[in-house]
Image: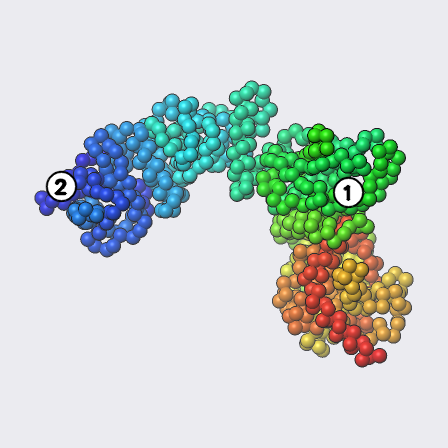
Amino acid sequence: MPAASQDAAGRISAALVALSPGIVLLCFGGAASRLDMASLVLRPECIPAQPPLSWARLATAQGPMLLLLTRAQPCFAPGAGLEISDGSGQVLQVVVDDPSELDLLTEGLRPAAILDLLRFIASKATGILRHSEDSGLAECCRRVAETVMTPERSALPIALCGHDMVMWALPEGLASGDGVFYAISRRRLRRVPVTGNTVVLRDRQYEDGYLLPPSGDGPIHLSPPGGRLPSLSELGKRKDPESRAYYRNGLAELSRRAASDADARRQLRDLQLLAPMEKPHHLAQPSRPFGASLEMAICDHAGGTFFRGWIRDPLGLVAGLTLRSPHGEHPVPLTELVRFGRPDLAQKFAGSPYGGAGFRPGFALHLPDAALRPVAQWSMRLELTTGDGITLIAPPGIMHAQSARDAVLGSIAPSEISPALMERCIEPAVERLHAVVMAARGAPEEIHIGSPLAEPDVSVIVPLYRNLRFVKPQYASFARDRTLRRAELIYVLDSPEQCHEVEHLLRGLHGLYDMPVTLLVQPGNYGYASACNAGAAAARGSVLLMLNSDVIPAARGWLQPLLSVLARQPRLAAVGPKLLFEDGSLQHAGLFFERGPEGEWYNNHYYKGYPRYYPAAQEQRPVPGVTGAALCVRRGAYEAVGGFSTDYVIGDYEDSDLCLKLRVAGGEIAYVPRSELYHFERQSIRDHAGYARTLAAAYNRRLHHRRWASLIEQLMTRAERRAARGR
């Protein structure tokens, strides 16, 4: 650092270093360097200095040097005058010199002093100045660090922790302690965590950069690799102690970061998935006095885990239970387990000499914070009254969010479900997993077959999933109906693996009937609500008709009554037709709500199973709602309420949810019996493994009840009063 100079007017010069276009460093020597930093006052002669102003004192061979780091501003331009003082009353006049380079000003500084200087700059750049991404500043600091580089102060690259993170081994004798480390690349400066003798840096651009330790004889060079680096998982497969130690260090660092860093959490998950899994283990011999199994331990993709298993303990040998992961243990009181019946176990252990499985051997549990760091495989430790313990191992528990959601919904037989199981175990896990599934939705692919209508009267939207048996008769009935020739037909395929098959089928039908059709192919299976919303987004009609794929018109001309009623009655937001079973009996004459055995509101249909021409079902009238199997709604009303809610799983209750949203927005709902169609009920959803024989319907019903119970109560009370007056 240069010694301070003084001009004829007695003013002291200050060296100016432009570290980057946005950051400058002023260096004060002589009397200014001895001022008390705690009470420094700086007054520019022109305009005031804008904070932040960061001060430091640096030891040099010529004596101490006072440093000011700040953003570039006019009051610190070359030739500017400054007045600097402290609490002693001494006032110094300073003039700013012409710019110098930082590496020129650091000539002759010891490596330890250069380390102190660079740490001062890095700490402020990553902190109060918010210039950690300043590439000019980073390159300036890297160039200075390079002037004191020595081979013995080099960190060597050890392994790749994912495709964009590198682990370096620090020089021997360097203690990380409690201090803060900073890393410098050509583009950025970062505050980095260091534990033990390694450091993991995310960006490979830190290769050939520098690490600034809390103390020592200068910066540490981050040596670039001389060849291909092994992956962390490859280190874990090696047998030598050094590689194994580095592997453990890498896992520990990823685990430490995983709670707040999504990339580290994913790397930790992926490493566990690729590591050899332990073979699942359970204790299920009838000849033993007790038994247990941890059958499921499924990550909910939001930091929690869903567990399902069973414990058979007729003699009371099990005293405690602990769930274990690579990141720690979770003792669980046996009373916290939510129990349920298992007829399969009752039969299996019926002949055991020590006693059977008991009334409710099954258990479920949801721990909302058990997997803030991903866990690929859990185990369960049973503590026995004898002081012994048994460890049982679950199958791998990290899977795709949709598979995990469906597994949780299918984990307990509907006949064994209880409100406590739903509320404490099933619902929290499914809600989290379903949110992850829906957040991953992408835009559908759009395929036009034939020339689309310029201005369709109505857009008919038909979701498709797996079952294609009704597409031919449905399409043919539309094509033979003159009123449908002014309709836009949109099929939304929710099983994209069938894309080529469905496109081929529709092109063949178009060749026969010459009716234009649009095929939207969802990127994944997201359920009825998402499919309808995708169809509505692509539709151009002012009226939207949501129609199940298993709904077939009973005769031509069925669409016009629906459109005419909407046109004549502006208060109506939506209408629905009469739907018939295959035998001609009534399936739907409007939707209403009734309470179930647990007090929850269920959806039901008026006059279900009655004759087709039952007099009361021949009357057009307002109804609480209409089924989504055939729901005709004004586009403006649909969009105003956000379309179908997508937080219902697969398909159920989102139709009544939409009707209730339309009512809250001021719209009315009506049933139109002059429009008749056949509905081959549940055929459009029967092939969905995530719905059939699962708790999806119960989950949706409870969600619907929590959301709408109060409004439904009012709605059904009014409906009953109207019915009483009619009698």
Residue 328 location, quadrant: top right
Can the viewer see residue 621? no
Mark 1 highlights which residue? 362
Task: Give the percent coordinates (x, y) of residue 607.
Answer: 85, 68
Residue extending furthest top? 240
**Mark 1 or 2, nearer chain start:** 2
Give the total number of marks visible in the rendering.
2
Specify the amino acid type for callout 2: Gln
Callout 2 environment at 10 Å: few (<14), some (14 to 19), or many (20+)? some
Q: Where, quadrant-wise, is the N terminus in this rendering?
A: top left
Q: Where, quadrant-wise, is the C terminus in this rendering?
A: bottom right
Residue 687 horizontal side relative to residue 185, left or right: right
Q: Nearer the viewer, residue 468 or 94?
A: 94
Circle 1 SS class: strand
Task: Give the percent coordinates (x, y) of residue 614.
Answer: 88, 72
As drawn, 410 above or below 350: below
Residue 702 horizontal side relative to residue 142, left or right: right
Residue 6 tag number: 2
Residue extending furthest front? 386
- Distance from the alpha carbon under mark 1 to that under mark 2: 87 Å
Specify the amino acid type for callout 1: Gly
Task: Give the percent coordinates (x, y) of residue 56.
Answer: 28, 40
Callout 1 environment at 10 Å: few (<14), some (14 to 19), or many (20+)? many
Residue at coordinates 21% horizontally, 52% vertically from top-left? 44
Task: Give the percent coordinates (x, y) of residue 619.
Answer: 82, 75
Q: Nearer the viewer, residue 208 or 380?
A: 380
Residue 148 horizontal side relative to residue 634, left or right: left
As drawn, 374 above or below 227: below
